[in-house]
Image (spheres, helix red, strand yellow):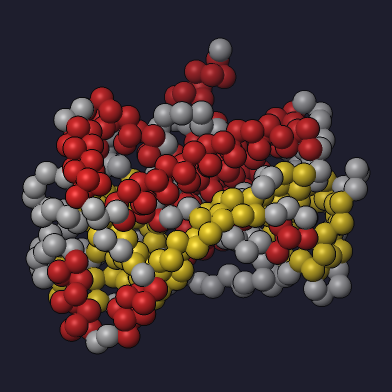
Amino acid sequence: MSKDFDVIVIGAGMVGSSLACLLAQEPGDLSLAVIDARESTPFDEGTDYRPRVSAISRASTRVLEACGVWPQIAASRASPYRSMYVWDGAYPADQAGAIRFESAEIGEPELGHIVENELIEHCLRERLKVTPGVQVFCPGEASGLVFSERGALVDLTDGATLRARLVVGADGSASPSRTMAGIEASGHEYGQSAVVCHVRTEKPHGETARQRFLPDGPLALLPLADGRSSIVWSTTPEQAAGLIAMGDAAFLEELTRAADNVLGEVTETSRRFAFPLRIQSASHYVRERYALVGDAAHTVHPLAGQGVNLGFLDAAALAEVVLDALVDDRDPGERRVLRRYERWRKGENLLAASSIDAIGQLFLRQEPAAQAVRRAGMALVNRAPLVKNEIVRRAMGITGDLPRFARPPLENSALAES
């Protein structure tokens, strides 16, 4: 096995694996190493849905298409949603203080897809196994990083040392490689935990994603292809522990009430899990020979479903920067090259994180004045189609400064011809 590479990606989750796939899809002789401590596990469609799901935007779909895995994902258990209904928990679901987004209003077949995280990761990892120029070190774990002007050395816990012109940290919010690279991250706990499970309801979900903002955090009901809904319930750690501990009958009753009976009674639940919520951002996304993507660079509250979508855009942007550098015969690991990626993505991610944070904080406030502001604002947006549709387009990733891997094929063709 080779020890010398052009790029080493530490972390084979959804974002790290997508980056490696994008770099390997382009014609050329790039050599890539992907390191992850977790062994790849088979994905069996005969088993129940995995607990963690993501709302995959149109931009992320295009990135996964460029990786060569979206057809497989779509043919498996991807669940399209064509509407989204958001309402303030201070009011009933059928009154003011609500916004409905429809894909038909912007001429799109759907707003996005609900997909299990493990399905996406499985398809990407399987793709990497058969991609020329890619070596996967799994299980493998980085124990040290050494940087120089000419390259980087990655020491593995098994004693091996790998060399590359560029190392990418895609190893999650705790990111050991970020610490080894000397990059700090700042943030804070939300004082909330997210409870996740899949439930069956009395009424069909109608391919509609729903979110109700409650006093302790938002409750999302995301449509699954088998007719159930995936629940992401953000609340206090104390209530989350209680929801995990209580019996199924009590939980179903509590969830039916929290969901305002919007889908009738909740009649069945899978096993419940909970995880703490945090907002975080790295002080820098790059340094000489090193770059951060995905949760290693930033984490956001799940209320807007943008976490992994921001990560896929990181991967697409960094892949574009690296490949453009190679075309121009430049060293992709030089900081002055990587700064283009940092300028491109850090501002976008900080804006998204602060916007999501502000929305969450506004809905946590329960005094009458705050409720009146929310109600008036949501009613105004609902009556302004241009504003509402622009919000939808940006959330879907079909507007803005997109990397070429996230753009529509026709747009890329037009740019190439010009």
When asked about the image quadrant of residue 10, the answer is bottom right
Quick check: can you spot residue 14?
A: no
Name the quadrant of the N terminus: bottom right
Along the viewing direction, whichever of 99 and 366 lies nearer the viewer: 366
Q: Position of residue 168 (x, y in %)?
A: 71, 51
Along the viewing direction, whichever of 92 and 82 lies nearer the viewer: 92
Q: Position of residue 177 (x, y in %)?
A: 73, 60
- At x 27% / y 85%, what residue is drawn? 246
Q: Position of residue 318 (x, y in %)?
A: 64, 40
Quick check: can you spot residue 276?
A: yes
**In the visual, does 74 lie left or right of 222?**
right
- At x 20% / y 71%, what residue is drawn? 255
Q: Position of residue 82 (x, y in %)?
A: 24, 44
When asked about the image quadrant of residue 302, the answer is bottom left
- Say above or below: 55 vs 198: above
Along the viewing direction, whichever of 311 and 303 lies nearer the viewer: 303
Along the viewing direction, whichever of 245 and 34 lies nearer the viewer: 245
